[in-house]
């Protein structure tokens, strides 16, 4: 898996989500049907989750792997703690 490809996928999803948020704001301002807005919102949430997953994959395949393979114990522990913190945030 190439780092650039994963980052491009995440960037694409984040840009799409940003566009969809702008669309939802416009829909709200124009008093459009609530279900249509909620449908757009769920699609946006899906894009954000996908972007998060792609960023996590990139981190695990590159940054995390490099840290674990290093000889620095503190670097390994920091990486594990970072993963745990991000996972806790995701599960809130």
Image (spheres, rainbow, N blue to C red):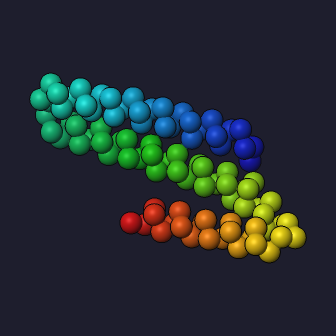
> What residue is drawn where x is 71% and y is 73%?
77
* Residue 14, x across and y down, in percent: 49, 37
* Residue 36, x across and y down, in percent: 21, 36
Q: Where 92 falls versus 14 (above or below)?
A: below
> What residue is drawn where x is 75% and y is 54%?
62
> What residue is drawn where x is 75% and y is 43%?
2
Left or right: residue 89 versus residue 40 is: right
> In the figure, residue 8 lies in which quadrant?
top right
Q: Quadrant of the C terminus?
A: bottom left
Name the residue nearer the viewer: 54 or 86: 86
Left or right: residue 59 versus residue 15 is: right
Left or right: residue 28 versus residue 87 is: left
> What residue is drawn where x is 59% and y is 38%?
9
> In the figure, residue 64 lies in which quadrant?
bottom right
Name the residue nearer the viewer: 83 or 12: 83
Left or right: residue 23 versus residue 52 is: left
């Amino acid at each position: 898996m190439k780092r650039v490809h994963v980052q491009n996928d995440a960037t694409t999803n984040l840009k799409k989500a940003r566009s969809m948020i702008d669309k939802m704001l416009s829909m709200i301002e124009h008093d459009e049907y609530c279900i249509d807005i909620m449908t757009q919102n769920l699609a946006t949430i899906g894009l954000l989750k996908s972007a998060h997953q792609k960023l996590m994959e990139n981190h695990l395949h590159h940054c995390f792997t490099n840290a674990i393979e290093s000889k620095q114990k503190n670097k390994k522990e920091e990486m594990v703690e970072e993963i745990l913190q991000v996972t806790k945030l995701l599960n809130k």
